[in-house]
Amino acid sequence: MDGAVMELELPDAAATQRLGEGLGRVLPAGTILLLSGDLGSGKTTLIQGLGLGLGISDPISSPTFTLVNEYLEGRVPLYHIDLYRLDGEEVTDLYLAAYWDDQETAPGIVAIEWAERLADLPTPALCIGLAYADDGGRKVTLATPNAVYTSLLEQALSHGLLVDEV
Ligand SMILES: Nc1ncnc2c1ncn2[C@@H]1O[C@H](COP(=O)(O)OP(=O)(O)O)[C@@H](O)[C@H]1O
Ligand SMILES: [Mg+2]
């Protein structure tokens, strides 16, 4: 892959999950994933796959009421954040930067649904944008400003069998 952006079709929920699983196998601790897209576009499904790829056996559900779910049993910790129900001020009060700035939480993968609600966006490793496709499936846009993640992305996609060969 040359460049920092790619687009893929995800014909069914299993494809969304496989993409997440591929990412979960290769992404290092310290990775921030910003997920955006309408309600139902597949953000949680992708993170469920991520959990599988990390070797997390706890079922991953949307942290809509808890806001942050922490899973510590996998290859690296997963912090799953969903900002759907929050307004800007509430998001600020959560001090989510603790998950990427502080030494207090073990470095992990931070996956944020409705990341566009963050006032201070952390420097993302990957921006994942999901959208409805006309055929009932989904489209995903993957973007990274960081070349290290470009090659990890290629590995993740080849694992997920979303591309024949990279
Ligand atoms: N690529 C896809 N094609 C069709 N349905 C999908 C796809 N990915 C996920 N879904 C389905 O969409 C629904 C909503 O997904 P979810 O991950 O909860 O969305 P979000 O977290 O963005 O609100 C689920 O029923 C899920 O199985
Ligand atoms: Mg969700």
Image (cartoon, rainbow, N blue to C red):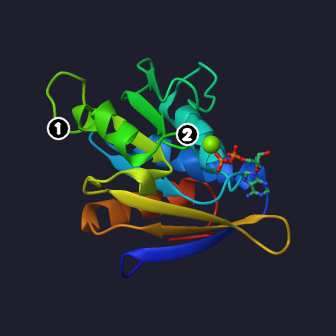
Q: Residue at x 82, y 75 (%)?
A: 134
Disc 2 to disc 1: CB gap under 8 Å: no
Q: Residue at x 36, y 29 (%)?
A: 76
Q: Which element type, helix, strand or loop, lies under badge 2?
A: loop
Task: Report the disc number at residue 76.
Answer: none
**Residue 120 placed where, x, y %?**
26, 53
Q: Is residue 160 above or below residue 97?
A: below
Residue 145 quadrant: bottom left
**Percent coordinates x, y for residue 100 in the rendering:** 24, 39
Describe residue 56's horizontal placement relative to residue 154 as left or right.
Answer: right
Question: In this figure, which residue is indicated by the disc labeled 2?
Answer: 85
- Label 1 belongs to which residue? 101
Q: Residue furthest left?
A: 103
**Mark earlier in primary sequence (2, 1):** 2
Which residue is at 37% across, 27% downward? 77
Q: Is mark 1 within 8 Å of ligand 2?
A: no
Whole-percent x and y of residue 124? 31, 56
Q: Which residue is outermost to the right?
A: 135
Q: CA distance from mark 2 to mark 1?
A: 24 Å
Q: Nearer the viewer, residue 148 or 98?
A: 98
Describe residue 47's horizontal placement relative to residue 10 as left or right: left
Residue 164, placed above or below residue 113:
below
x and y percentages locating residue 109 in the rendered image: 37, 38
| Kind of residue sitting beneath label 1 | Asp
Type of amino acid at the residue the image marks with label 2: Arg
Please rate how many residues cluster around mark 2, counting C-alpha atoms within 10 Å: few if below 14, some from 14 to 19, many from 20.
few
Say above or below: 146 vs 31.
below
Circle 1 SS class: loop
Q: At 64% from the left edge and 23% from the top edge, which residue is drawn? A: 59
